[in-house]
Amino acid sequence: MERDLNQKKDLTQKKNITRALVDEHRLILRMISLLERNAPRTADGSYSNWKFYLDGVDFIRNFLLVPYRAYRKLPVLA
């Protein structure tokens, strides 16, 4: 019985981790979509919020590099 409870707990944890990764992936894809949507507008001059691009790249970098660096035990770059 205790073994069954531990197996259910492990399965729940795996589902929660998977859900978190899927949600983070969706956020990254949404940011990429926004960057792609605004790029032509920037090129034709109808969008001039350059800080949006810096924030977008920083957002993606934090989602991609921070977990990777933690996994590889690499120093965080400023």
Image (cartoon, rainbow, N blue to C red):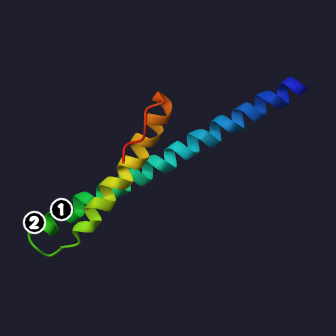
Report which quarter residue 42 is drawn in: bottom left
Outermost residue, top side: 3
- The amino acid type of the residue labelled 2 equals Ala
Residue 24 in percent (x, y) is at 48, 49
Q: Residue at x 22, y 65 (%)?
A: 38
Q: Position of residue 39 (x, y in %)?
A: 18, 62
Q: Residues within 10 Å of mark 1 (few under 14, many from 20)?
A: some
At a point 44% along the width and 42% down the height, the residue shown is: 66
Instruction: State the image quarter where residue 56 is shown.
Output: bottom left
Element type at mark 1: helix
Q: Residue 30 location in percent, x, y?
A: 37, 56
| Element marked by disc 2 | helix
Which residue was labeled with disc 2? Answer: 43
Who's the residue at 23% across and 72% down the image?
A: 49
Amino acid on which the number 1 mark rests in the picture: Ala
Neighbour tally class for label 2: few under 14, some 14-19, many 20 plus, Cα within 10 Å? few
Q: Quadrant of the N terminus?
A: top right
Across and down, in percent, residue 51 comes to 27, 67
- The residue at the point 77 percent across, 33 percent down is 8
Q: Are marks 2 and 1 in contact (CB under 8 Å)?
A: yes
View extreme (right): residue: 1
Return the residue at label 1.
39
CA gap between label 2 and label 1 equals 6 Å
